[in-house]
Amino acid sequence: MEFEISGPVRAPVLEETAFGAPSLVYLKHPGRTRGFLLYVLAACVPLPEEYAASTGKRFGVLHSVARDICQIIAKNQPGFLTTSALRDEGRLGDNMNKILPDSEYYYHLGEDIRSFSSFVANAFVK
């Protein structure tokens, strides 16, 4: 079965749950103005109670899941996540079991790769 999309594609409207409004994690390419959005994940892994109480953020995603999604989009090129579009600021550690709270994260490729066209799979660049 095939479906055709007519009109602009809109992000789904997520209903508020008993836990409050849904949390989202935005994965971005750092080399574009305001970051080129690569993927959006629904944050559904509970954060520790003490963190949630002090920040108001209750859910996140596993670092390994976010990093792996970015690596797939980047044609399987290894890289790392940061909280800043600048590659030398806000670099996350190597703990892939860490839970990343809802926020914006940027995927940077290895030290010697910086061009956008080498970053994103051909399906995304037209």
Image (cartoon, helix red, strand yellow):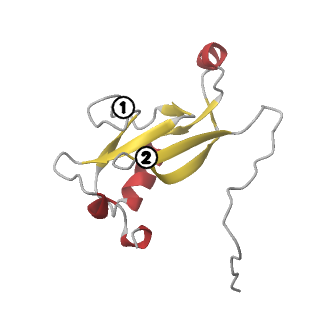
Pointer 2 with pointer 1, Cβ within 8 A:
no
Amino acid type, label 1 = Leu
- Quadrant of res 46: top right
Residue 24 locus on image (x, y percent): 61, 41
Q: Residue at x 75, y 35 (%)?
A: 21
Please, is residue 49 above or below residue 89 in the view? above
Q: Residue furthest front?
A: 33
Residue 64 locus on image (x, y percent): 43, 44
Q: Nearer the viewer, mark 2 or mark 1?
A: 2
Quarter of the image with the C terminus is bottom left
Residue 120 locus on image (x, y percent): 36, 62
Q: Residue at x 38, y 50 (%)?
A: 32
- Quadrant of res 45: top right
Query: Position of 76 compared to 47: left or right?
Result: left
Q: Residue at x 37, y 55 (%)?
A: 71
What SS does tag 2 mark?
loop
Residue 85 locus on image (x, y percent): 36, 38
Amino acid type, label 2 = Gly
Q: Which residue does the numbered mark 2 point to in the structure image?
A: 35
Counting residues from the N terminus, which is met first, the one under dot 2 or under dot 1?
2
Name the disc covering residue 43, or none: none
Name the disc covering residue 92, or none: 1
